[in-house]
Structure formats: structure tokens, C-alpha cells
Image (cartoon, rainbow, N blue to C red):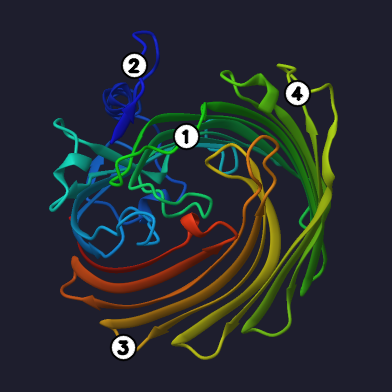
Amino acid sequence: MSLRKPHSTSAFTYREAIPLLLAILFFCAIAWGEEGEGGGYEQRYYNIKAGPVLFTLNSGLSLEYNDNINLSNGITSPRQSDIIVRPHFGIDAVSELQILPKSQTDRTTLGVSFNVGTRRYMQHPELNRNELDLNVSPDSELSFLIRTGHFHTRLYERFALDDDPSGDGTLSNVAVFRRINNHVGARTTWNMNSKTSFSLGYDHGNLIALDYATLSGTAPTLGSLDNSTDQLSFTSFSQIFSLLGVGFNASAMSTNFPGNPNQNMTTYSYGPFLDARFTQYTTLHASYSMTESQEGSLFYGGGTGGTSIGNGDNNFQVSLTNHLNTYYTQTFSVGRQTVFNLLGNLTTTDSISYTSGWRVNSKITLTSSIFAEDSTDQSRFNRNPHYKRYGCSFGTGYQLSRKMSATLTYQYSKKISDFADQDYQQNTMILNIKYAF
């Protein structure tokens, strides 16, 4: 069964973004074709050069076998397997010009990263659209960096179009959850001196749920998921000495649900962090923050007038990275984090993970990871699920030629919830072939 929202004739759709980005790229190539040279950016690898604009192109094909595409426990609803084909194409472009003549510090850089692909289910074509079904990678971005003396200002727009539900632990019994994520913002950093810096940023984000589908005959009751966020953030950092730096983060985020104002909320977070280098091969990042949430949006109201949600969360993150030798790198992380999930609720997650990478030789690499999570959903209107997830992955990569590479990855994940119908386990095997032009 599939539920789809009618598209508004005035709403911005993802199809309109593609010609817009291409137009921006060609405009930059023509408008800046005669600008000054220099700045070192020409040392970047590129496939095509149009004036000061450097283009890097790549393409690939991914084949995935998934034994539980609908995240089902196999009891209350049947598990469904499938082979999924994903062709994809990526383009990166960067251009740099001087603000003032003969200046090495006052420069601007325009960058575009756009990775697009499509996903086709072989055994369950009902999950495919009749039209070309595009996916835009979350790392797609349009950015503009302005450097003037000690100040750096970065303007950006990050956009994604995705339909994979497995990345959010709150979702179960869903095969496709199609949504648009878009973030527009700016951040200014003042490098007061070589050891101290301050930055101030603003970010506006939108989540638009397009449709969702199941293979069990009934669609989940997800409610109105469309929301927008406005966030102000501040960061200070000081390098105490060469091996230790400390800083402070603070942010305020207001979330608005147009279809359900009672779910509006405002979240405050603040706390210190440090970066330490114990040896040439071992580094530590540690952070702590207090997160507090109140009902009602700063800009749109809603809720019950600033009533606190919960007693506040003490979040932290500790990551230790060790380069065991020239070829083997490992990272151990433990922490607690409170974030918005795709259902529009806050989720607090305690997690622990280990990742490693081994460069066997110039052609072969091996990777592995293992993780465990314990999460509680702070829903105010529905049941409050508590669930655990754990999993692992193992992969190998091989450089077939100077421009072509291949990776083979196995992933396993399992979810155990307080509600049995939310349990699932999933095995996937992914072969990805990539070609850099």
C-alpha cells in the first residue's frame, strides 16, 4: 500500500532544483572565465576546466541484496527480500576569485557538490514509480565561502532526496519513506589570532514527507511530518597549547509543524568540548552538553506555552582515534545524543561503536565496524517506545584501475523494541562499482 501527498502547484519540487544548479554552474563558468588566477585551488584534481571553474565527475552502479526491505519482524507481517539496483552520478565543481587585486587572503570560493541516482526494486516493482525516481545524496551542497582578513563567512544550501527508512531506528514495517531535506544557512568565523576563534551561525531547515509505502497491506499512521527548523549557534575555541584545545558550544533550535502546531517545540543546548593529541598517532575529541526542550516554537507558538519536556538531557560524546601504524586506523566512540527523528519526536540514544580501516596494499583495503544503541523516544502524543539496535559491517575495496574501483560490503542490523511488532533484523550485501572520469 502506498500513500502519496498531492503536490502543490506553488511548492518547490526537487525536479526544479536540477536545472537551477546546472544554470548556476554555467553562469559561473561564463561570468568568471576571465578572472584572476592563483590561490592554489588549481592543484585540485579535476576532469574539466572552464575558466576558473574546475569540474570533477564520477559515476557508478550499486547492486544490493536485502533480506528484509520492509523492516518486518516476520511474525505480525512477512519479511520481504529484494535485489535493488542503484545507478548514480556525481559532479563536484569549485571556482575561486579574488575580492581585492593581488590579495592572497581576501578571496571567495564557490563550490557545488551534487550526487544523484535512482533506486529500482527488481522483485517488488510496486515500490518503484512509473517515472524516473531520483535520489539526491545528503552530501549534496551549494556553498559560497568569503574570506576577508580574519573573518570567514560561509553561505550554504544542503539538500537531499531520500527514500531509505533503515537509517532511523524509530521506523519499522516501512519499505519506502520518501522525503526531502533542505538546509540553508550562514556561519561567520572570526580568527582573532592564531590560537583563538569565535563563530556564529544560523540554519533554516525543511523536512517534507512525500510518501511512504509498506508491503504488509496497511500503511503506518505517521501523522503530519512536514516541519521546519530555525537554529542559532555559537562556538568558541582556544588552543591552550599545541596538544590541547578547548571550546564551548551553544545553540537554540525552534521547530514548527504546520500541520500539528501542538507538536511545536524549542530546544536549547550548551556545553564545553576539547580536542587533545596524546601522541603523533592518537587523538581524542570529547564534548558535553545540556539539552533542554520546551513546548512551543519561538517564532510560531503552539504547544502549551513553554512547558518543559522532560528533565533535560545530559549529552556527551567521546571519540578516540588511533593510527596503529601507517596502514591501520581505528576509532572508538561512546556517547549520548538527543536528536529529532523522522517521526517528529526527540530521541535520546546511548551508543558505543568501533570502526577500523586497513590499507593492505596500494590496491586492497579492508573496513569493519560494530555498534550498539539504546534509545528512548520522547513522544508526547503516542506510545513512548524504548528500543535497542546493534549491528556490524565488513567490507573490502579493490582498485581495479587508476579510475575504476569496487567495494563489497556486508551489513547486519537488529532492532529489539518494547513492542514486538517493531522488532526486525536485516542482512544486506552491497557491491558498488565506481568510475572517476
Q: Earlier in the sequence, mark 1 or mark 2?
A: 2
Q: Quadrant of residue 243?
A: bottom right
CA–CA distance in space, label 1 to label 2: 20 Å
What residue occupies the far front of the structure in this picture? Answer: 76
- Distance from Cα at disc 2 to Cα at disc 3: 51 Å
Q: Is residue 232 visible?
A: yes
Return the x and y of residue 432 as percentages of the image width and height.
Answer: 22, 64
Amino acid type shown at disc 4: Gly
Sequence-wise, the earlier of marks 2 and 4 is 2
| Residue for badge 1 | 221
Q: Is residue 48 left or right of residue 123?
A: right
Contact between marks 2 and 4 (CB within 8 A): the answer is no
Q: Earlier in the sequence, mark 2 or mark 3?
A: 2
Instruction: Report the Cα–Cα distance between label 1 and label 3.
Output: 51 Å
- Evaluate if marks 4 and 3 touch, with contact meaning CB atoms under 8 Å apart: no
What SS does tag 3 mark? Answer: loop
Nearer the N terminus, badge 4 or badge 3? 4
Please, what secondary structure does the residue beneath circle 2 have?
loop
Residue holding disc 2 = 7
Q: Residue at x 22, y 49 (%)?
A: 88
Left or right of 295? Residue 128 is left
Determine crowd level at label 3: few under 14, some 14-19, many 20+ residues with C-alpha closer than 10 A: few
Q: Position of residue 335 (x, y in %)?
A: 70, 66
Residue located beneath label 4 in the image: 303
Residue 6 image position (x, y, % from top left): 34, 17
Which of the two discs, 4 and 1, labels the residue nearer the N terminus?
1
Q: Amino acid at mark 1?
A: Thr
**Label 2 crowding class (10 Å Cα cut-off): few <14, some 14-19, many 20+?**
few
The N terminus - image quarter: top left
Disc number lying in front (2 or 3): 2
Q: Quadrant of residue 96?
A: top left
Residue position for label 3 = 361
